Image (cartoon, rainbow, N blue to C red):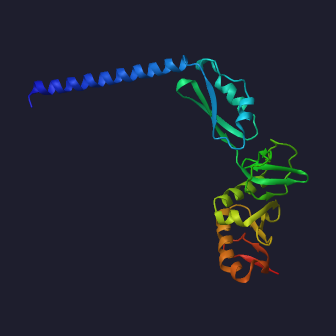
Amino acid sequence: MSSSKKHTGKLKAVVIAVCTLLVFGLAVKAGIYMEKNTRITEVNFTGNSFTTDDELHASFESPVGMLADSVHLPGLYKKITELPYVQSVSASMASRGRLTFNIFERQPIALMINGENRFFVDKDGITLPLILGHDVDVPLLYGFRASSVADTLNSEAFEQVSSFLAEAKNKPFSWLTISEVTWNEREGVVALSTENGVKLIFGNDEFGRKLTHWEAFYKQVATHKGIRSFRSVDLRFSNQIIADKI
């Protein structure tokens, strides 16, 4: 290939690159201009399950009719996250002025029983209100105190229980076979089996391994001898399972 052809080819490549950048830059500028000059026509929500659209709408003053760049989104986020189940929120703007808030909600991991008080609680120990007609498959939790929604169970004991429940939720067998959970200084995390209320002692830490041992014990021993044959199963030790028979 001659040097003149090579030069021509390089020149074409440079021209194409410059044109591409120019078009991209104009598109970005047009996008920014459109967003700043777009008037909000509607507000939608996604990701919410425990929190209704009506509750979300009522939590802040509607920005419908305002220009997009005049809306103070951090202020709206703050209002929305004051709702019990809303952990965080982000927003996106679509064409024709549709503003969508993306809701990330707290998820219950247990139903806390404290006398007459009953609350859901999430992995961070935040208490959440019960939602009528909204069934949640979680174990019962005893031994912790909370008097109102948004109280936080901030203790080493709850950290152990939360870690245990998180591991159990990732193991379908464990989640199906554990009905009640508590904690005490001597035994650590203690649960009752869904079937026949057998006391299961899990202690502290390494809950993944202990839950695996519980599943193995149930399938290899309890199903043959009958779960009713046992009063308690101690899973705290790495090399043995201590079962107390009736």
User: Residue extending furthest bottom?
Assistant: 225
Q: Is residue 160 left or right of residue 24?
A: right
Residue at the (70%, 35%) spot, across then down: 53
Q: Is residue 81 visible?
A: no
Residue 119: x, y in percent?
82, 49
* Image-quadrant location for residue 186: bottom right
Residue at the (40%, 19%) spot, across then down: 26
Residue 225 versus residue 118 in the image, above or below = below
* Image-quadrant location for residue 129: top right
Which is nearer the eye, 175 or 5?
175
User: Residue extending furthest right?
Assistant: 116
Q: Is residue 46 left or right of residue 12?
A: right
Residue 115: x, y in percent?
91, 54
> Which quarter shows the C terminus?
bottom right
Residue 95: x, y in percent?
52, 26
Which is nearer the eye, 227 or 190?
227
Residue 176 versus residue 134 in the image, above or below = below
Q: Is residue 8 visible?
A: yes
Residue 123: x, y in percent?
72, 50
Number of numbered callouts drawn: 0
Residue 97 versus residue 232 in the image, above or below = above
Residue at the (79%, 72%) spot, across then down: 198
> Which quarter shows the N terminus?
top left
Which is nearer the eye, 230 or 117?
117
Residue 134 versus residue 83 in the image, above or below = below
